[in-house]
Image (spheres, grey):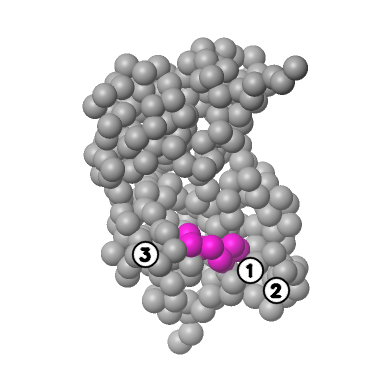
């Protein structure tokens, strides 16, 4: 008996990993790119097993606005900087905090197991297991919020601190622990303001450091680092909170004024 099809929106490196995993389980995969008319495809595939949104975080809101009504209770989200407000209008959303890398021409590199929560979390675990990628199913929504914030803490702390110190996450942990913690404390304060939730800073930082240990040679600063810093400070301004370490880093990297 044929299995239900799956829809993957965004067939970049990450989308291709999930598509291959679902195919290995026997689910036909319908890819969606910028030229695809989702409403027309929804008439052909009205009840997919899941609709995985694998676009970048900057494109997420626009894509969610275009998702056909028939697909809206079948969503799976995997973006960086993801928080519940990003998907609050939708029901039955499955989220996964991705802790593996996929670069062109290379196999997936696992850092730590990827936590997933929602009605399709177990399907994700089965699918990614076919590629040797471990997934931990998280039952409680509050626990998944913690996992999302840990991922955001890892990304924002390493990227933004990297603007000053460069190097790898292992080097930052070993050589710049005080500065790293100052950045992390600012990031946690921002995450608390964005989620309306209080967290234990020590628990979050410990979880971030476990991820550092999973790949200590991971570079701190990616291409998105300046944009992540700017976005963080825009949120801080909107929420009227002061993030002194992030603000100082932004001043260091401000474009000089030419007279």
Q: Nearer the viewer, residue 18 or 145?
A: 18
Circle 2 residues within 10 Å: few <14, some 14–19, many ≥20: some
Residue matched to label 1 = 32
Residue 255 occupies quadrant: top right
Q: Nearer the viewer, residue 156 or 82?
A: 156
Image height of 29 relative to 114, above or below: below
N-terminal label among 1 and 3: 1
Q: Nearer the viewer, residue 171 or 156?
A: 171
Q: For residue 188, which numbered disc appears in the image?
A: none
The quarter of the image holding the N terminus is bottom left
Circles 2 and 1: CB distance less than 8 Å?
Answer: yes
The quarter of the image holding the C terminus is top right
Using residue 76 as the reference point, say whether residue 35 is left or right of it. Answer: right
- Point out residue 118 in the picture as x, y percentages from the top left corner: 47, 51
Image height of 251 relative to 118, above or below: above
Using residue 58 as the reference point, say whether residue 35 is left or right of it. Answer: right
| Cα distance in 3D space between marks 2 and 1 | 9 Å
């Amino acid at each position: 008996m044929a299995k239900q099809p799956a829809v993957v929106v965004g067939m970049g490196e990450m989308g291709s990993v999930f598509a291959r995993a679902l195919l290995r389980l026997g689910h036909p995969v319908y890819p969606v790119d910028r030229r695809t008319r989702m409403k027309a495809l929804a008439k052909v595939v009205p009840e997919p097993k899941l609709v995985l949104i694998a676009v970048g975080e900057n494109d997420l809101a626009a894509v969610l606005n275009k998702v056909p009504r028939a697909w809206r209770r079948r969503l799976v989200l995997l973006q960086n900087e993801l928080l519940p407000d990003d998907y609050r209008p939708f029901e039955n959303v499955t989220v996964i905090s991705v802790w593996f890398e996929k670069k062109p021409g290379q196999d997936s590199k696992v850092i730590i197991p990827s936590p997933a929560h929602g009605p399709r979390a177990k399907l994700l675990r089965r699918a990614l297991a076919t590629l040797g990628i471990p997934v931990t199913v998280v039952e409680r929504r509050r626990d998944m919020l913690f996992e999302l914030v840990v991922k955001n803490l890892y990304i924002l702390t390493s990227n933004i601190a990297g603007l000053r110190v460069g190097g790898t996450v292992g080097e930052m942990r070993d050589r710049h622990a005080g500065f790293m913690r100052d950045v992390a404390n600012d990031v946690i304060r921002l995450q608390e303001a964005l989620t309306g939730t209080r967290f234990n800073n020590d628990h979050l930082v410990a979880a971030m450091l476990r991820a550092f240990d999973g790949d200590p040679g991971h570079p701190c600063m990616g291409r998105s680092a300046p944009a992540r810093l700017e976005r963080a400070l825009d949120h801080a301004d909107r929420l009227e909170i002061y993030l002194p370490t992030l603000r100082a880093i932004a001043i260091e990297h401000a474009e000089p004024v030419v007279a």
